Image (cartoon, grey):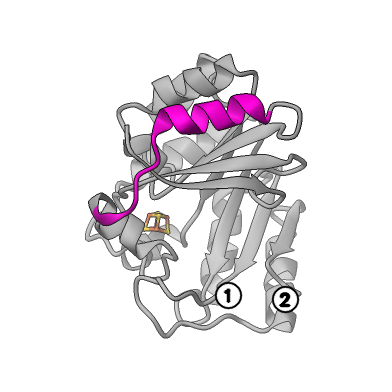
Amino acid sequence: MLIHGFTKTTLLDYPGKVAATIFLGGCNFRCPFCHNAPLVLAPEQEPAFPLEEILHFLEKRRKILDGVCISGGEPTLDPDLRSLCRSIKALGYPIKLDTNGTDPGLLRGLAGEQLIDHIAMDVKSSPEHYASLTGMDGPDLDRIDQSIQWLLTDPLPYEFRTTVVRELHTEADIIRISQWIVGARAYFLQAYQDAPQVMQPGFTAYPKEEMEHLCDLVRPAVPSVRLRGID
Ligand code: SF4
């Protein structure tokens, strides 16, 4: 398998844990605000990290790290994801998986085999605007909905998250998302942050006051809502 990025230590990627993060390439979405455009569009041109070296690093760091995050791109597209999880689990680490939720069957399978311990699922927008927010003509909303409905049954720790882009999200979108994930145990509204490798440059974030207002709009359906990425 090809690993296209590795963060040796982070306090940000796995809630409550000192973690390392592994990035897998490729994605079935083309979100215009994606921060990892090269990883999504041309993963074969990205540097590759040998798996053996990463596993060796994780083995040596067992006293310092207490979790591993697998991110992307979209990691559920990688046919070797299950074996990667097994190798990491064999070292004793809990695993958090970042996903866009397009493979509910795989998520259920990995959780059922206790190969993942935490899921962070992006909810890109309201169902009505999923196509434009993911850059796809016909994103499979049924699969997204299956992942959401399954996570809402609380099969393992999880969070939903939405990167809020001023030019792409309206108040109505955010309210509609909150109705879709009503009662979620954890939901984060993340302010868009510009980056050099963004898929489509030129987007901006809502100011803090507006993000707080969006939180207020979400709270009746999702009391757990919090902001992330706001100073
Ligand atoms: S934001 Fe996530 S789902 Fe969207 S293109 Fe980038 S990696 Fe894929």
Q: Would residue 56 appear left or right of 104 to someone viewing this image?
A: right
Which residue is label 2 attached to? 213
Checking the image for residue 171, the label placed there is 1
The verdict on residue 166 being magenta is no
Residue 67: give x, y in percent of width and height: 66, 33
Q: Which residues are magenta?
A: 45-61
Residue positioned 50% across, 74% down in the render? 169
Q: Earlier in the sequence, mark 1 or mark 2?
A: 1
Q: Quadrant of the N terminus?
A: top left
Residue count near mark 2 (Cα–Cα under 10 Å), binned few <14, some 14–19, many ≥20: few
Residue 114: give x, y in percent of width and height: 56, 17
Foreground residue among 138 and 157: 157
- Residue flagged by tag 1: what amino acid is it? Glu
- Residue flagged by tag 2: what amino acid is it? His
Residue positioned 34% across, 56% down in the render? 39
Foreground residue among 85 and 146: 85
Residue positioned 63% across, 44% down in the render? 159
Residue 212 in view (yes/no): yes
Up-down relation of residue 157 to residue 182 (above or below)? above
Q: Callout 2: helix, strand or loop?
A: helix
> Would you identify the image quadrant in which residue 83 lies?
top left
Foreground residue among 147 and 106: 106
Residue 155 in view (yes/no): no
Q: Would residue 108 appear left or right of 129 to someone viewing this image?
A: right
Residue count near mark 1 (Cα–Cα under 10 Å), binned few <14, some 14–19, many ≥20: some
Up-down relation of residue 23 to residue 95 (above or below)? below
> Would you identify the image quadrant in which residue 84 lies?
top left
Quadrant of the picture in which ligand 1 is shown: bottom left
Label 1–label 2 contact, CB within 8 A: yes
> Magenta segment, principal secondary structure?
helix
Q: Would residue 31 appear left or right of 185 to someone viewing this image?
A: left
